Structures are given as C-alpha cells and as structure tokens.
C-alpha cells in the first residue's frame, strides 16, 4: 500500500464534505479583481500542505521502522525485557517563556535596532 495522495480532496477527510474544485459561480462581474491571485495562492498553499502531510507520513514510517530495529536489538540482548516500560520522550517546553515568545522578542530587537545589525561585519 503506497502513500496516500493528499491533493485536491485533502479537506474532504477533515469536514466530511466532498471538495468541489473549480468555479461554480456564474456572476463573474461582481468578483473582486484580487480573487484570481488569491485563489492561485491558496491553491499553491493547499498543495504545499498536502506535500508536507505526505513527507511527515513517510518520515513517521521511517522512524517507526527504526524503532522496530532498536526493539529487535534490545530483544536480542535480553529476550525477557519488557519494551512497554520504555516511555516516549516528549519535547519539554522552556518553563520561562511561552511558545514563540523568544522568536518574537528577537525579531522585535532586530526591528527596533538603530543601526543595521547585519551590516556590522560588512557581509551584506
């Protein structure tokens, strides 16, 4: 079974409604001139997100296979070892800051700097 295609119908699995691509409107005179570029951008974003879903699924399969190999080696060394005792290591958040705070503060410092910090070394 190959990887699942997440193209134009990716949203169908999220809300249970079939995704209908294409233009169903008949009144083109009232459409904003920004509609076409916005739709093209949204279509590109949709396809990129579908690609990321596929990449993450294949990466998850690769990691699961690596985990099975590690489990097999553990069983070779000690056949009685209980693999269920191994807890999954989760990412620990930094207790001092909420998620994204450090990045936002760093960007604020760069934005409000009086001289261009990137030009100090003369590289840019």
Image: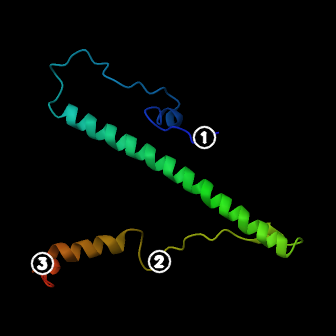
As drawn, the residue found furthest toward the right would be: 80
Disc 2 vs disc 3: which is toward the camera?
Answer: 3
Left or right placement of residue 44 versus residue 85 in this view: left
Read off the residue under disc 1. Answer: 2
Q: Would you call the spot at circle 2 few (<14 residues within 10 Å), some (14-19), or many (20 or more)?
A: few
User: How far separated are the C-alphas under marks 1 and 2?
Assistant: 38 Å
Report the residue marked by disc 3. 116
Sequence-earlier tag: 1 or 3: 1
Label 3 sits on a secondary structure element that is loop
Q: Nearer the viewer, mark 1 or mark 3?
A: 1
Q: Quadrant of the C terminus?
A: bottom left
Please determine whether, in this image, residue 2 is positioned above or below residue 118.
above
Hey, which residue is sitting farthest top in the picture? 26
Q: Which mark is residue 79?
A: none
Lateral position of residue 85 relative to residue 48, left or right: right
SS under mark 1 = loop
- Judge the density around disc 1: few (<14), some (14-19), many (≥20) Cα neighbours within 10 Å: few
Render colour scheme = rainbow
Identify which residue, 9 or 72, lies in the foreground. 72
Q: Secondary structure at mark 2?
A: loop
Q: Position of residue 34 (x, y in %)?
A: 17, 34
Quadrant where the N terminus sits is top right
Q: Position of residue 4 (x, y in %)?
A: 56, 39
**Measured along the vertical axis of the image, is residue 47 above or below residue 88?**
above
Q: Tell me which residue sits at (83%, 70%) in the image.
A: 75
Q: CA distance from mark 1 to mark 3?
A: 50 Å
Query: Looking at the picture, how far across and down is residue 29, in whole percent?
Result: 15, 19
Find out whether the residues at labels 1 and 2 contact each other: C-beta distance under 8 Å.
no
The crowding category of the residue bearing disc 3, from other C-alpha atoms within 10 Å (few below 14, some 14 to 19, many at least 20), is: few
- Report how far apart the C-alphas of labels 2 and 3 lie in the structure: 30 Å
Discs 1, 3 touching: Cβ within 8 Å? no
Which residue lies under the disc numbered 2?
94
């Amino acid at each position: 079974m190959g990887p699942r295609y997440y193209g134009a119908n990716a949203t169908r699995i999220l809300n249970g409604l079939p995704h209908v691509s294409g233009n169903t409107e008949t009144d083109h005179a009232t459409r904003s001139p920004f509609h076409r570029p916005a739709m093209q951008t949204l279509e590109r974003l949709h396809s990129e997100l579908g690609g990321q879903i596929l990449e993450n699924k294949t990466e998850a399969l690769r990691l699961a296979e690596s985990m099975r190999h590690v489990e097999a080696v553990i069983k070779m060394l000690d056949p009685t070892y209980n693999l269920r005792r191994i807890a999954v290591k989760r990412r620990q958040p930094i207790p001092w800051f909420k998620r994204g705070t450090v990045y936002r503060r760093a960007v604020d410092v760069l934005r409000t700097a009086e001289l261009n910090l990137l030009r100090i070394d003369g590289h840019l």
